[in-house]
Structures are given as structure tokens and as C-alpha cells.
Amino acid sequence: MKNQGYYSQFGGAYIPEILASTFDELETAYIEARDDPAFWQEYLDLMSTYSCRATPITRLDNLSEQLGGASIYVKREDLNHTGAHKVNNVMGQGLLTKRMGKTRVIAETGAGQHGVATATMAAKFGFDCTIYMGAHDVARQRPNVFWMEQMGATVVAVTEGSQTLKDAINEAFRDWVTNMDDTHYALGTACGPHPFPEMVSWFQSIIGTEARQQMLDRTGVLPHRVYACVGGGSNAMGLFSGFMDDKEVELVGVEAGGRGRGSGEHAARLAYDDATIGVAQGYKTYFLQDRDGQMQDTHSVSAGLDYVGVSPILSHLHETKRVRFEAATDDDVVAAMQRTVRCEGLIPALESSHAFAQAYLEAPQMSPEENILINMSGRADKDIFTVADAIADPKWRDFIIQKAAAYQMENLNG
């Protein structure tokens, strides 16, 4: 499937000449690490002692009974240190950064989970750290910004473009061009120029490797369907990689349907028919773009899924029909999150809740003898402001008003 970083027609490394030597260095270091069993063992040891791996699977007993049909299981990536799957990738890239002798890391982030994970990695390994984040995302993910800064990272609010993830990626690449000698760009998803899609998927494959064995140990059979939300695609590639060769397991990726098909306010690249193939940010894939190749604005209730492109590996899997892609609307996502919280006591991130929404829609049409597995890629602590606004919780609104009034009074008196 892969040839020089391509997956059929998708992928590649469309980079300026000034970055060619840096990418050559990164690819060489990655290949050497990938082929070194001691490196992977060091990675496994780090993840088991620092990030609670292996994360368990949990059966949703109540919702399996309420919905009828298939039994629903969840892969608990929310139990990772930092609260999401993102730490799998950044800890691997942190070890690679040490291997290359770099002293500074930079990253982009949308929902903030990758930013927190990168700041965590930098604090542990002693790297300087700068995080680029769209100003719009900074405003709606303030708790994550707070923790990044507490860990010593410099958070740069990007005010260009739509002020979301694609703009943060652009700024991170600009930084890298001028600081190549001592800086590694810890790209957070399975996108961008080669070797990032393959490398990020490799580190995230720990999810699928664990999940496949856990489902066999727990149920005696493989799941009939597995679901993962899809922004750039790292958590999906992580889960799907464990079942890629199991043709009897259907793989379902769920994108951000936003305000619905035809609204122009979504981030569904593969589930809807609004995206076209193009080249941007160093690689070839499906992008939401106009006829002139200009990137369009996206929308999602979840800050982590509103990316304009998608992993070239997933584009290939879409065209070969190995992965089925669906989209969940904002309203369905919030409802699925509320239902999971109320019925199971789990708090899936808004990103993860896209996968839950689609699974809840399809489970009742399946047989009671069948099992499905959802990747709970993160938890919703970071989403408290967004969720409280979405459900118009009056107690939360009053709390914010009172806090703001107290802060204003304190400043006036001070």
C-alpha cells in the first residue's frame, strides 16, 4: 500500500526545499527507531509506567440493554495520563526527539489535548515547548490552555484565517522552518508530509493492538464493528490498525457533521460529498476547498474535529472501502454525550461522542450476539464550557456570571 509515503494516490511530502534535510533526518531517525526492538520496548515501558497502559475495555451494560441489539464495549483511552489518546503519540515522538538530540518541541493543537500532551512530554523530558493554537480554540478550550502554561509551555494564539486547527498547523510549520537545528515538530495527527502519517499511526497502533486482544480475552470473538471519531485521524488509525487484517470486522469512522449536510458548516471530508482531492500543508488528500483550491471554513461543536483535511491513509481506506465513513451532527453528539454520562457514568469528549452517536444509532439494528467497540479517545473535562453552553445549563450560567462579577469587583478594589 505504501510507496515513498504514498497510499495509492494520497500522501507524499510536498515541502519547501529548506525543509528537505530536516524531513530526511526525521525519516531516518524514525526508520531506525521503528526497526530497533529496544526502542519499542522503551516506549512500552514508558507508557505502562507513566500513562496507565494498557487502558481497559468497558462494557456499557445499561445502554446495551436499553438500546437492544449489539453489546457495546468501549476502549478507555480517556484513562491515559492527560485524558486522551494524544499522549501515545507525543511520548513516542519525545523519545525520538531525544534520539535526534533536539532540545525544543513545537506543536499545533485544536481541542488542546495534543497541546497538553506535548507540554507534558516537554516537562518530563526537559524540552523547551511552544504550542500554536487558533484563537477561536483558545477561547473555547481555556482549561487546556491553563494547564499547558502551568507546565511551562508558551501558548501562541493564532489570529489568522479561521483561527482554528489548520491555521495553527501553518504557524507551527513557519516556526519549524526558522528553528530546524534544535527543534522537532511533534505533529499531533496522522496528517502532514511523510513520515508523519505513518509515524503517528505507528505510535497510536498501541490502541488497536491492546483492544483486539482484550476483546478476544473478554468475549472470545472479535468485535463485529469498531467505531472511532475522525478529525485528522490519529485515534481512528490507532484503533483500526489492530483490526485492519480482520476482514470480518467493519471499521467505521465518524466525522463532524456540524450543522448537517448541505449547511456548509461541518467538517465531513469523506462522509459528505463536499471535499475534493488537493495538496495543502505538505500532503495530498481530501480537503474542504473551493474551486480555486482555497481552504474553506469548517465548523464542529468539538474543537478537535474541525480540521479541513484528513489523513491520507484514511482517504486511501475510504476509496478502497475498507473503512465506512459517517458524520454525526452537533445536536446528536451532545445528546450522545449526555446519554453516556447519565446512563453509564462515563464522560466522553465531544470528539469521542461522535463515535458514540453513530454507534448508538446502529446498535439496535444489530443482533444481540454481535459486539461493537467504540474508541473513547478522550474525556470531556476540557469541554465543560462548550457543553454547558450547548445544553443551556442555568446553574453553570449563574456560576460564570457570579465569577465574572467577583473578578471585576476584585480588580476594581485592587
Image: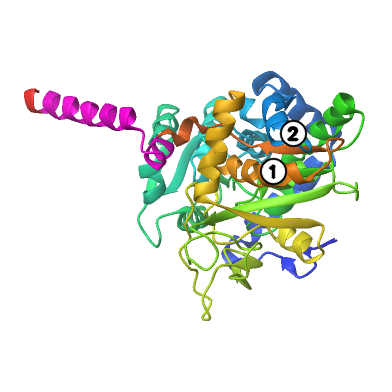
Q: Residue at x 88, y 37 (%)?
A: 222
Within-10-Å neighbours for mark 2: few <14, some 14–19, many 20+: many
Image x and y of residue 132, in percent: 45, 47
Is 400 covered by the magenta stretch? yes
- Disc 1 secondary structure class: helix
Is 55 covered by the magenta stretch? no
Q: Nearer the viewer, residue 253 or 281?
A: 253
Image x and y of residue 357, in percent: 62, 44
The outermost residue toward the top is 49
Q: Is residue 173 left or right of residue 32?
A: left
**Does label 2 or label 1 sit earlier along the sequence?**
2
Image x and y of residue 322, in percent: 82, 57
Q: Amino acid at mark 1?
A: Ala
| Residue 103 is at least partly visible in this image | no
Q: Answer with the quarter of the image where residue 313 lies.
A: bottom right
Residue under pointer 2: 72
Residue 359 is labelled as 1
- Decide: marks 2, 1 in contact (CB < 8 A)? yes
